[in-house]
Amino acid sequence: MITDIKGLHHVTSMAGDPNVNNAFFTDTLGLRRVKKTVNFDAPDVYHLYYGDEVGTPGSVMTYFPFPGMPKGARGTGEVGVTEFAVPKGALPYWQERFSAKGMSSQSGSAFGEQRLSFEGPDGDAFALVESEERGREAWTGNGVGTAEGVLGFHGARFALRDAAATGELLEFMGYQKAETEGNVTRYLVEGGNAADTIDLEEAPGAPTARQGGGSVHHIAFAVEDRAAQLRVRQQLMDTGYNVTPVIDRDYFWAIYFRTPGGVLFEIATNEPGFDRDEDTAHLGEALKLPTQHEHLRPKLEELLPEITA
């Protein structure tokens, strides 16, 4: 069994308009944009990162905004809901904030936790879950206070046709099966960061998801460093998974593999972090390019739409 997984590192989704995406996360949700860079494989498309003050692993939502991208179709084989943690008692504030911005939301509960479900501008499925702070501190942007602000991820809910094989994988990755409510089973990992929850929702009759705007592209799990990542890679390969070589993503190192349920997993290092090329006070302000794309800067600065906030 793998013992190096420390919870979630980041979640990466796709979107349409980068300015709409940026406004939603920095204004509506009050997160900080901690990096403005480009997609390694399509450098004419932004890669935007949002999180807490420094982009702590377990707090970072990232996006590839492809202008004009059609919205995805919900279904099985995907991360169905991305869940953010907020302090206890914060949900009435968020319900009122969303209403004032013309957004609808739905109150509910799961596994004894109060939650507020809502959609992002591309139809992204999100939930705010009231949680203990567990040493985390919210970034207080655009009028959101410390008593209400997003603390980071609570976890994620997968939508799967058959959850058994993914559940076995999670247990191999160090997660423990906690409890089941209806067709949803919760898994928790101990000893890591506070973004430690994965729920598997089994929906055998649902259609297969189609990726597009609002779809999660991949979900990343955190390991402390490159040595831990190499141990995890070897353990996964020994179990029969086809894992990529280690890829330098500038702010972390990454490996990827496809899970039995169809969800793309990444294992990402906590090092070196988002302050490796920007001072903490100015994270996310300048356009940062991977070294291999730096020669394209004049062209990319002309092609990429200006982000106005």
Image: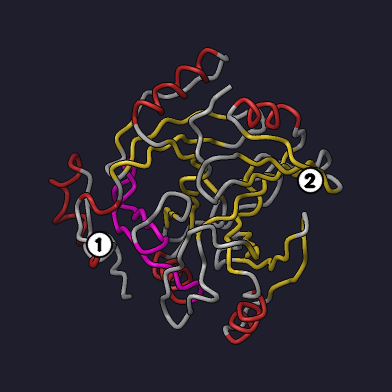
Q: Secondary structure at mark 2?
A: strand
Q: Secondary structure at mark 1?
A: helix
Quadrant in the picture for residue 92? bottom right
Looking at the picture, which amino acid does disc 1 mark?
Thr
Q: Is residue 103 magenta?
A: no
Foreground: 288 or 85? 85
Q: Which residue is mark 2?
A: 184
Please rate how many residues cluster around mark 1, counting C-alpha atoms within 10 Å: few if below 14, some from 14 to 19, many from 20. Answer: some
Quadrant in the picture for residue 53? bottom left
Q: CA distance from mark 2 to mark 1?
A: 39 Å
Residue at (54% x, 19% y) in the render: 241
- Left or right: 204 as drawn, with respect to 49: right
Give how far across and how far down residue 165 sits, in percent. 71, 27
Q: Where residue 280 is drawn, which disc sits there?
A: 1
Colour scheme employed for the rendering of this structure? secondary structure
Q: Is residue 38 magenta?
A: yes
Range of residues picked out in magenta: 28-53
